Image (cartoon, grey):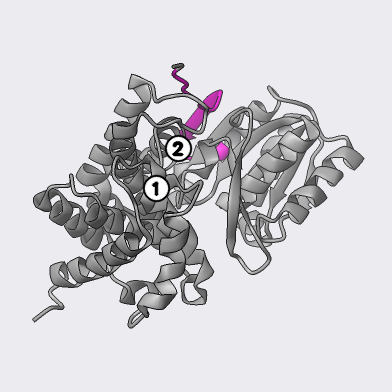
């Protein structure tokens, strides 16, 4: 069986690197389409536009509508065609970047992603996660290639809400937890092969980096500081997690995190926050996870500020019948839960979610 590792062609991270975006874009084309929203443009617009102008490039400026729908990707692709752009550039959060990816594939132009928050591992991946206009998860497409260039300005990310960085840690936390579990079944990764040793090592490094530097990075980010811990966590959230999940494996944590988008109470929460609760649920589902490892991970989640209870996702008092909709999909055909070595049932998933809530409440000291 073949092994496959997928990754972006170039990854650039550091304080102030967006000042060089024009230089890097010039390696890809002459007329970039830049997709961003008004808030992002207000933060980095002057820097980006000055650099592009200095590089002698002609910009096609496009406002992102806010959700990764197929209609939005088609709209952006049409603009690329009409304006003759030769590079698709997404600047902002994961949904903007995912839309720029889809438009790049549709039009055959080169691709650059520039995250302004480190809330997930979308920037390095070759996947687009689709939602409907009501923000409900519909599924994802894995494209033939990853971005040509990923630019991560850590000063911009340190200036973003701390909650976004923490959410990224939740998404990154799942990388090793899911990969380790999936390895027991010889999973086929998103690149169409089994994980390489490099992918496994990257996934583990992601986990170890979070455990060692997560709390310190949060403390620094609260003061908008770019410290070595912040640099390491940004790399873990964006690069290590991105390579690890695509070339490693996925399992229950992401199934639960994605399906929680179907609960209106969870709409205000980041993807990584929902995935973090999915991680705790998977730990409670998997019979191979030692108790002390569950406690270690849950305690770390609490320390950095990730949700480990239903209440932390505005689901306090949720009824079992509602969660059965998640359990049924998890146990159904085509589910990522098939990557576990044991049978996953609907009742088992729901039991694990209630067990996760109980464990979280206990470790928070909320159980008398």
Q: Is residue 53 visible?
A: no
Range of residues picked out in magenta: 3-18
Front-most of residues 28 and 126: 126
Q: Is residue 219 left or right of residue 11?
A: left
Across and down, in percent, residue 349 comes to: 33, 60
Across and down, in percent, residue 62 comes to: 77, 51
Residue at the far right in the pictured view: 82
Across and down, in percent, residue 244 comes to: 39, 34
**On residue 337, which mark appears?**
1
Q: Which residue does the image show at 20% across and 58% down from the upper left? A: 298
Q: Is residue 71 left or right of residue 38?
A: right
Residue at the far top in the pictured view: 2
Q: Which residue does the image show at 40% across and 71% down from the upper left? A: 323
Q: Is residue 15 magenta?
A: yes
In which quadrant of the rendered view does residue 27 lie? top right
Q: CA distance from mark 2 to mark 1?
A: 19 Å
Q: Is residue 48 magenta?
A: no
Q: Is residue 353 left or right of residue 67?
A: left
Note whether 231 is above or below 93 in the view shown.
Answer: above
Front-most of residues 137 and 152: 137
Note whether 71 is above or below 360 in the view shown.
Answer: above
Which is in the foreground here, disc 2 or disc 1?
1
- Classify 10 Å Cα crowding around label 1: few (below 14), some (14-19), many (20 and above): many
Question: Residue at label 2?
Answer: 242
Q: Secondary structure at mark 2?
A: helix
Looking at the rendering, in which quadrant would you find the N terminus? top left
Q: Which residue does the image show at 46% across and 23% down from the upper left? A: 5
Note whether 140 is above or below 13 in the view shown.
Answer: below
In which quadrant of the rendered view does residue 322 lie? bottom left
């Amino acid at each position: 069986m073949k092994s496959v590792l997928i990754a972006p062609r170039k990854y650039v991270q550091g304080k102030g690197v967006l000042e060089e975006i024009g230089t890097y874009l010039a390696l890809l084309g002459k007329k970039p389409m830049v997709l961003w929203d008004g808030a992002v443009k207000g933060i980095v617009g002057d820097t980006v536009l000055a650099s592009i102008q200095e590089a002698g490039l002609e910009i096609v400026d496009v406002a992102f509508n806010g959700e990764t729908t197929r209609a939005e990707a088609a709209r952006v692709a049409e603009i690329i065609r009409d304006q003759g752009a030769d590079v698709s550039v997404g600047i902002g959060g994961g949904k903007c970047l995912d839309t720029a990816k889809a438009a790049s594939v549709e039009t055959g132009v080169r691709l650059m992603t520039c995250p302004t928050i480190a809330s997930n591992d979308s920037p390095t991946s070759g996947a687009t996660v689709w939602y409907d206009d009501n923000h409900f998860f519909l599924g994802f497409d894995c494209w033939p290639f990853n971005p040509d260039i990923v630019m991560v300005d850590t000063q911009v990310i340190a200036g973003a809400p701390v909650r976004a960085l923490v959410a990224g840690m939740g998404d990154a936390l799942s990388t090793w937890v899911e990969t380790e579990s999936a390895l027991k079944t010889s999973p086929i990764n998103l690149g169409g092969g089994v994980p390489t040793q490099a992918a496994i090592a990257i996934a583990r490094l992601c986990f170890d980096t979070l455990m060692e530097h997560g709390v310190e990075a949060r403390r620094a980010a609260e003061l908008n500081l770019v410290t070595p811990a912040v640099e390491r966590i940004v790399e873990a959230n964006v690069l290590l997690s991105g390579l690890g999940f695509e070339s490693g494996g996925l399992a229950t944590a992401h199934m639960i995190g994605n399906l929680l988008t179907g609960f209106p109470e969870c709409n205000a929460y980041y993807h990584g926050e929902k995935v973090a609760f999915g991680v705790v649920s998977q730990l409670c589902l998997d019979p191979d996870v030692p108790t002390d490892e569950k406690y270690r991970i849950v305690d770390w989640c609490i320390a950095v500020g990730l949700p480990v209870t239903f209440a932390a996702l505005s689901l306090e008092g949720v009824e079992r019948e509602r969660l059965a909709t998640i359990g049924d999909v998890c146990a159904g055909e085509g589910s990522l839960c098939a990557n576990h070595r044991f049978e996953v049932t609907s009742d088992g998933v729901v039991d694990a979610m209630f067990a996760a809530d109980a464990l979280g409440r206990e470790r928070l000291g909320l159980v008398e």
